[in-house]
Image (spheres, rainbow, N blue to C red):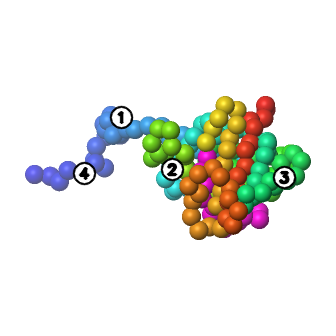
Amino acid sequence: MKNFSIARLAPAALIPLVLVMLVGCEAPTKPATTVLGEPVRAGVKRPVIDHELTGLWAVRSADMAGKPMAMPPGFELRIAGDRYGTGISGNYSDRGRIELFGDELAGQARRMDVVGEVGMNKGKRFSALYRMAGSDLEIIYDLSGNGRPTDFISREGTQHLRITYQRKAQ
């Protein structure tokens, strides 16, 4: 008996074989290469996205360690998918990613980690809680890096920064 070799098959016989192998394969899609000016990292697991967060946010109020904190006029937060940028009027000097945790029970505060990749927070990770109330977004960050806030109260003696943002029309 002669040895079987694919090379001996006529080219016309290979076409149906290739088509059978491709059945069920999805056509590759070209992923976005940048979000908020930053490259999308390849090989990273699909992030948890909260579509309520996507948009442009202006600061309504802020307090740090239990005391009111003045924010620069025009300071805003832009969120697109799992990317963020903060700065004044579109000049986002601090940029990075947001890692959301989707395992909260209904009615509980949602958790996030903010990971700086460009700017003054490059290489830093801040744990936070966030919640939505109408057109407002409230986030409380632990800037000490020692844990995650347990509620939305910025207490004296902590490095908890609580900011309330209002959604801006785009």
Q: CA distance from mark 1 to mark 4?
A: 23 Å
Where residue 116 appears, as percent x and y from the top left, is: 68, 61
Local secondary structure at mark 3: loop
Q: Which residue is mark 1?
A: 23
Mark before the other along the chain sequence, 3 or 2: 3
Label 3 CA crowd tier, 10 Å (few <14, some 14–19, many 20+): some
Q: Which residue reaches farthest left?
A: 1
Mark closest to the chain's N terminus, 1 or 2 = 1
SS class of the residue under badge 4? loop
Q: Amino acid at mark 4?
A: Ser
The image shows residue 96 at horizontal and vertical percentages of 68, 56
Along the horizontal axis of the image, is 95 left or right of 47? Answer: right
Span of residues in magenta: 116-130
**Distance from Cα at disc 3 to Cα at disc 2:** 28 Å
**Mostly what secondary structure, the magenta segment?**
strand
For this rendering, which residue is in front, 16 or 73? 73
Chain-order first, disc 1 or disc 4: 4
Which of marks 2 and 4 precedes in the sequence? 4
From the viewer's perspective, is the residue at label 3 or at label 1 nearer? Answer: 3
Amino acid found under the numbered disc labelled 3: Met
Image side of residue 140 versus residue 105, left or right: right
Q: Relative to 75, say whether 124 is above or below.
A: below
**Front: mark 4 or 2:** 2
Marks 3 and 2: which is nearer the front? 3
Mark 2, residue position: 101
Q: Residue 87: where, in percent of width, then height?
A: 81, 52
Question: Given this view, does label 3 or label 4 mark the residue nearer the observer?
Answer: 3
Marks 1,2: beta carbons within 8 A:
no
**Residue 71 badge:** 3
